[in-house]
Image (cartoon, rainbow, N blue to C red):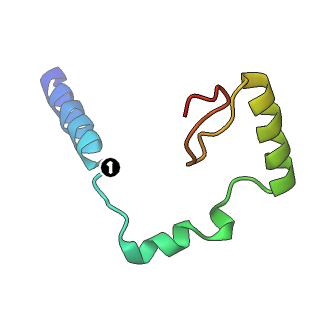
């Protein structure tokens, strides 16, 4: 009985791991992912203020798709 449950647990684990990340997003579905509802931040002004505080605290800026940082070593 113990061997059957071990085999069953192994099969379930392999099935779970094998099934994760196998589904690609089609080009026709990407428009829904770019919808405003999918944005996590509710207030763009608050997000901008948070990023400003973080850039001052970290001593660097950038990393949002633009080259360069706060150190000047582009």
- Determine the residue located farthest toward the bottom in the rendered image: 28
**56 up-or-down from 19: above or below:** above
Q: Position of residue 68 (x, y in %)?
A: 58, 37
Picture residue at 46% right of the left edge, 70% below the top: 30
Name the residue located 21 percent from the left edge and 29 percent from the top edge. Answer: 5
Which element type, helix, strand or loop, lies under badge 1? loop
Query: Percent position (x, y) of residue 26?
Result: 35, 70
* Residue depicted at x 69% and y 35%: 61
* Residue 2 image-quadrant placement: top left
| Disc 1 crowd, CA 10 A, few/some/many (<14, 14-19, 20+) | few
Left or right of residue 8: residue 67: right
**In the rendering, at what x and y percent does residue 43 appear?**
83, 56
Q: Disc 1 designates what residue? A: 21
Which quadrant holds residue 37?
bottom right
- What count of labels does the image hold? 1
Q: Is residue 43 visible?
A: no
Is 72 on the left or on the right of 7, as rendered?
Answer: right
Of 60 and 43, the residue lying toward us: 60
> Compared to 35, does 42 lie above or below?
above
* 13 with respect to 57 (left or right): left
Quarter containing the C terminus: top right
Query: Image quadrant for the N terminus?
Result: top left
């Amino acid at each position: 009985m113990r061997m059957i449950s071990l085999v069953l647990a192994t099969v379930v684990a392999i099935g779970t791991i094998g099934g994760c990340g196998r589904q690609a997003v089609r080009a026709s579905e990407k428009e829904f992912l770019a919808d405003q509802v999918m944005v996590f931040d509710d207030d763009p002004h608050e997000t901008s203020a948070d990023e400003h505080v973080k850039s001052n605290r970290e001593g660097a800026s950038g990393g949002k798709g633009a080259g360069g940082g706060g150190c000047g070593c582009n």
